[in-house]
Image (tube, rainbow, N blue to C red):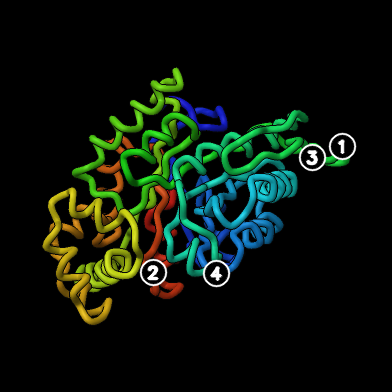
Amino acid sequence: MSERVDGTASDDERVGILFSLRDDPGLVVRAEELGYESVWAAEGQGKSAFGKLERWATHTDDIGLATGIVNVFSRTPAALAQAAATLDAHSNGRAILGLGVAHPGVVEDFHGAAFERPLARMAEYIELVRRYLRGEAEGFDGEFFSPARTSFWEAFEPERAAIPIYNGALGPGNVRLTGEYADGWLPNLYPESQFAEAQEWLAEGARRADRDPASVDVAMYVLTAVHEDRERAKRAAAEHIAYYLRDIPGYYARAAEEAGFSDDVEVVRAAPTTEAGAERISDDLLDRLAVVGTPAEARSQLAELRAMGVDLPIVRAPAGTDKEWVDRTLQTFAPTK
């Protein structure tokens, strides 16, 4: 694409970073110093993403502050719009909304809400959040929410009438929905071999809304395991992937199976522990789902993802690794290198 969602010119060095569940303002300051475009805060069953981002806003000046992701079941659209508009005001217009439908483990087991009709809910949710940010006074009669008015008190005017919204979509229907409604697409652990087909789903959704498919920012969470010892790097990436395939219900296993890795999924799920499952992941699946190797090898692999069509790679260190891994990730993919 030729422009970012904020309207500024793009280049080949756009890169974000996901700190997942970490809450370390020092890392965020370092990311800003190194030229990262945005920093993404996960939530799940941990600290509030907005709480972390509000804290990080006080330590930084320019870097984008993104939820990555918050689900559309645990907050009303009004509550989400309030949180996003407040973050945007406190950061001088740096908020980015990464949304997702999550999965039953978060929605039902943790929040106690019914995981029902997630795609229809996402479409209505995006529309309502945008109405709140625009300050439209008239009500909305929806399937899930029917507020009598969608404007804030006159004492609060949002910093921007529109905040970029990314959807963490994986399945065909959700990717099409992204093309139709969202500003950006945010897949995670998505096999490279399936990416071209998914881009067609995205374009199909965009055409439904008379949108140029190129206007949808293609971001991607990129699992990276960077180490001079390649075997250590492979092991860290394999443990991360095994956790997602074995312990998180949803589309991750299905996407791997559709890419031809049913045997990997089967043996990982049959393993007694995540660590044991990691030992059974093939090198081929690792190559499809992660950037693994020395710093030079990793940078080269990231360039391949850009060539494939990823506008904004959002790098992350493997789950469970220490701060040294995060520091090495920051340094390896820094746009200013």
Where's residue 74, x and y in %? Answer: 58, 57
Residue type at tag 3: Phe
Badge 1 density bin: few <14, some 14–19, many ≥20, Cα 10 Å: few
User: Can you see residue 249?
Assistant: yes
- SS type, badge 1: loop
- Residue 45's place in the image compared with 212, above or below, is below
C-beta proximity under 8 Å, tags 1 and 4: no
Q: Is residue 66 left or right of residue 273?
A: right
For the point 44% across and 42% down, the residue is 119
Question: Tag 3 or tag 2, which sits nearer the N-term?
Answer: 3
Tell me how far mark 2 sits from mark 3, CA to CA: 38 Å
For the point 59% across and 50% down, the residue is 65
Which residue corresponds to mark 2? 319
Tell me how far mark 1 sits from mark 4, CA to CA: 33 Å
Residue 10: mark in rendering = none
Residue type at tag 2: Ala
C-beta proximity under 8 Å, tags 3 and 1: yes
Q: Nearer the viewer, residue 230 or 91?
A: 91
Residue type at tag 1: Glu
Badge 2 density bin: few <14, some 14–19, many ≥20, Cα 10 Å: some
For the point 54% across and 29% down, the residue is 8
Question: Tag 1 or tag 2, which sits nearer the N-term?
Answer: 1
- Residue 303's place in the image compared with 215, above or below, is below
Q: Is residue 177 left or right of residue 231?
A: right
Which residue corresponds to mark 3? 152
Q: Nearer the viewer, residue 336 or 115?
A: 115
Residue 46: mark in rendering = 4
Which residue corresponds to mark 1? 154
